[in-house]
Amino acid sequence: MTEFETAAPEVETPTNHGTDRYYRPLEPVRQLLLAGIGAVTIAGEVSDEVFAELVKRGEQTREEAIDAVRERRHRAEARSTEASSFFRSRMDDLLNRLNLPSKADVDSINAKLNILTRKVDQVQASQVDVEFTPSPPPSEPEPTSL
């Protein structure tokens, strides 16, 4: 061959298996395009699985959070009841030491006072009836001789 002659492009034959890249310059682009399509396909399949797993874990986490909130609320209510009972007993002890009546004592006294008030009212009403009963007119005194 001379300097001005060019070699004819080599055609892929069963013997060279397309290894000569000089004559197939778009082959890497084609492979890159196919790799991208494959990646999108795999990503779609994996993303469906990952999405399903995320939903499942989200539901589990939500249920765990609800259970945790319920447990904390129950513990807080128990502590509140315990603190209230403790405070009430300490106040009762303090009132007893100061010899002050408790609310129950005051309520009991009020109930007894209401009963006594009703009885006094009944007695007064019966005395009023007796006081207003007409009595016979007084007789005139007899003249006394002196």
Image (cartoon, rainbow, N blue to C red):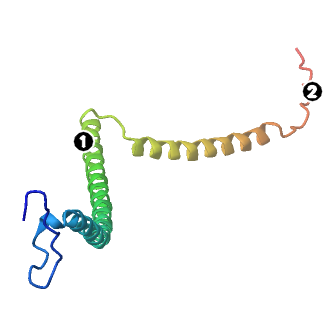
The residue where tag 1 is placed is 90
* Vertical position of residue 74 compared to residue 89: above or below: below
Question: Considering the numbered disc 2 on the image, is that residue within a helix, a strand or a loop?
Answer: loop
Which residue is painted at 9% across and 84% down in the image? 15
| Placement of the N terminus among the 4 image quadrants | bottom left
Q: Quadrant of the C terminus?
A: top right
* Disc assigned to residue 140: 2
**For this view, does 82 lie left or right of residue 113?**
left
Q: Quadrant of residue 7?
A: bottom left
Indicate whether 124 appears above or below 58. above
- The one nearer the camera, 55 or 28, is 28
- Near mark 2 (Cα within 10 A), the count class, few <14, some 14-19 or many ≥20, is few
Q: In terms of depth relative to the viewer, which is nearer, 24 or 116?
A: 24
User: Outermost residue, bottom direction?
Assistant: 14
Could you tell me if the residues under marks 2 and 1 are in contact, i.e. CB atoms within 8 Å?
A: no
Mark 1 lies on a secondary structure that is: helix
Q: Which mark is residue 2?
A: none
Q: Identify which residue is drawn at 41% across, 42% down.
A: 103
Q: Position of residue 125 (x, y in %)?
A: 73, 42
Counting from the top left corner in percent of width and height, residue 118 is at 63, 45
Q: Residue at x 29, y 63 (%)?
A: 67
The amino acid marked with disc number 2 is: Glu
Q: Give the residue furthest to the top.
A: 146
